[in-house]
Image (cartoon, rainbow, N blue to C red):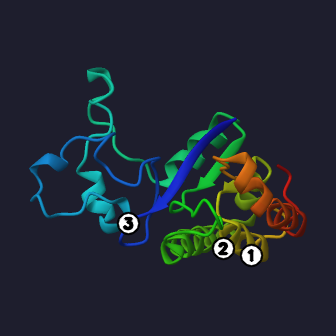
């Protein structure tokens, strides 16, 4: 199984990258004006494709680009890998577990749902193939509720970060358990 994070570009393209910015894992952005945002959500697909996402790791990977979700899904299916697609969402409040940027979380999720709906309309057999290998995970229960409403058959995993078990778990455990039950999470 392979796990990866999905985010959305300014123009609505689904990209596979962990960090919310391009600064740690790409090169090329240093030539941009200092005031230009380095956040994935503020950059177009074309701008993201200008960046080299491989050379920082090793010169053998020079020229690698931030991949589109379609590329990664196609590769995983070709290699017969199980897929854990994490809907990358904003940081959450430790006390409440609520998103610090719910609008962006919703944008990512709705774009992902629309992408799957397009596949469903064009190639239902392909969607079945993807869903047979797919687990969608997120720290955002709101995102998981949107996915569940659109696709009752997909496997979901509820992610929770608990930094202070004594304080946070006591405040959040009932809501987490309820969400997992209502969502029918498998993990």
Circle nearer the N terminus (3, 1): 3
Circle 1 residue: 150
Circle 2 residue: 117
Give percent across and percent down for residue 71.
50, 48
Q: Is residue 123 left or right of residue 152?
A: left
Query: Which numbered disc, 2 or 1, marks the residue closer to the eye?
Result: 1
Q: What quarter of the picture does the N terminus occupy?
A: top right
Report if residue 130 is visible in the image. no
Give the Cα distance between marks 3 and 1. 23 Å
Q: Nearer the viewer, residue 180 or 96?
A: 96
Residue at horizontal 32%, vertical 33%? 54
Query: Which numbered disc, 3 or 2, marks the residue closer to the eye?
Result: 3
Report if residue 118 is visible in the image. yes
Pointer 3 and pointer 1: residues touching (CB < 8 Å)? no
Pointer 3 and pointer 2: residues touching (CB < 8 Å)? no
Local SS, label 3:
helix
Q: Which mark is residue 41?
A: 3
Residue at horizontal 54%, vertical 72%? 111
Give percent across and percent down for residue 149.
77, 77
Give percent across and percent down for residue 152.
84, 70
Local SS, label 2:
helix
Q: Nearer the viewer, residue 71 or 155?
A: 155
Q: Circle 2: is it few (<14), some (14-19), or many (20+) Cα within 10 Å?
A: some
Give the Cα distance between marks 2 and 1. 9 Å
Above or below, 42 relative to 26? below
Q: Is residue 170 left or right of residue 71?
A: right
Give the Cα distance between marks 3 and 2. 22 Å
Q: Which mark is residue 163?
A: none
């Amino acid at each position: 199984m392979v796990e990866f994070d999905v985010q959305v570009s300014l123009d609505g393209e689904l990209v596979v990258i962990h960090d919310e910015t391009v600064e740690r894992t790409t090169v090329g952005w240093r030539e941009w004006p200092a005031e230009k945002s380095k956040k994935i959500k503020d950059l177009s697909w074309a701008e993201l494709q200008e960046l080299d996402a491989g050379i920082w790791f090793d010169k053998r990977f020079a020229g690698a680009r931030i991949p589109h979700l379609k590329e990664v899904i196609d590769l995983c299916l070709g290699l017969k890998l199980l897929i854990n697609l994490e809907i990358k969402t904003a940081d959450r409040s430790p006390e409440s577990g609520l998103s610090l940027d719910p609008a962006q979380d919703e944008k990512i999720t709705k774009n992902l749902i629309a992408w799957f709906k397009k596949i469903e309309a064009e190639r239902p057999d392909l969607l079945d193939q993807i869903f047979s290998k797919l687990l969608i995970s997120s720290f955002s229960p709101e995102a998981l509720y949107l996915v569940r409403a659109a696709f009752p058959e997909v496997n979901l995993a509820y992610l929770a970060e608990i930094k202070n078990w004594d304080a946070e778990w006591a405040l959040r455990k009932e809501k987490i358990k309820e969400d997992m039950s209502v969502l029918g999470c498998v993990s």
